[in-house]
Image (cartoon, helix red, strand yellow):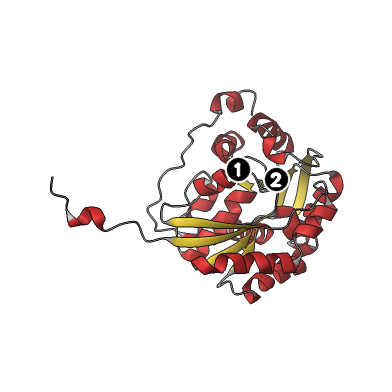
Amino acid sequence: MEVSDAEFEGPLAQRGIGIIAPFDLALERELWRWAPMEVSLHLARTPYEPVPVSLEMAELVSATDHLQTATRDVLGVEPEVVAFLCSSGSFVHGVAYEEALCAAIESAGAPSGLTTSGALAEAVRTLGLSSISVVTPYDEPLTRRLEEFLGELDVTVVRSQYLGLGGGIWKVNYRTVADLVMAADDPAAEAIFVSCTNLPTYDIIAPLERNLGKPVLTANQLTIWACLGRMGLPMVGPGDSLRGVFQEDADVPPSPEIGAPPDVLEEGVS
């Protein structure tokens, strides 16, 4: 059988995103679901720290020397942007420190550097948000640091819900996250932010946005959105409020909802 030349023209030209992940990240698969086919994610991890999720851990994983080492570890595959995929580690010391983390990544050789909390700040500015509710898996002190970070952005936190977990965050089920989001909702909140890149959210974003009638922004979603925006690429996956922000003229596929549990989320929500 004759094979045409076209069959050997691939693979699709790859474009890379470098990801600096905390040592305990367990949701790599969720990250890939946000990315278009031509984008590859190249992960490096911060060193293992034998402490629970806390202010202390957030400070340890966000040490600039760790981020610079991880950045250099992924530069060999020529990523267009390198992101520190960590909410708490990038908001723990406020806006100025978040900016310093981006500078550290770029000084290590990244063409462009960003963080999860920086992506949140971009979304706040782009969507014109002035009041939101927050959901976290953290304890109260770490959750308060997130509120302080948002306060520096002139955003009022209307309501907070948190789980108080010291580990195993990736094991939290969708029902628990959805209940927290709905409990955090308030008429005065223009959006809900779900913090932590280790908290599963992908399949419940779309049904929650339908039920609540407002954006539900999550840590992994925002990080990949900001990376793709710098690359001039459309975001795939759920999050209609963000889809057209960077790519108004892009032909973007509809939000996939495979695996979502819409029935359980539809009940009892006004």
Classify the position of the C terminus by image quarter: top right
Q: Visible in this render: residue 155?
A: no
SS class, disc 2: loop
- The answer to the question of whether label 2 and label 1 lie on touching residues, with beta carbons closer than 8 A, is yes
Q: Visible in this render: residue 229?
A: yes
Where is residue 109 shown, x and y percent of the image?
Answer: 59, 75
CA neighbours of label 1 inside 10 A, class few (<14), some (14 to 19), many (20+): some
Quick check: 58 left or right of 172?
right
Say which of 238 and 74 sits in front: 74
Residue under label 1: 214
Mark 2 vs 1, N-terminal side: 2
Classify the position of the N terminus by image quarter: top left
SS class, disc 1: loop
Residue 189 is marked as: 2
Say which of 149 and 174 sits in front: 174
Q: Which of the 4 image quadrants contains residue 114?
A: bottom right
Where is residue 174 shown, x and y percent of the image?
Answer: 64, 32
The type of residue carrying mark 2 is: Ala
User: Residue at (44%, 58%) from the top-left corner?
Assistant: 248
User: Residue at (60%, 55%) from the top-left corner?
Assistant: 223
Residue 266's place in the image compared with 241, above or below, is above
Estimate the spatial distance between the alpha carbons at disc 2 and disc 1, rounded to whole Å: 9 Å
Quick check: 111 left or right of 153?
left
Residue 176's place in the image compared with 82, above or below, is above
User: Residue at (65%, 23%) from the top-left corner?
Assistant: 268
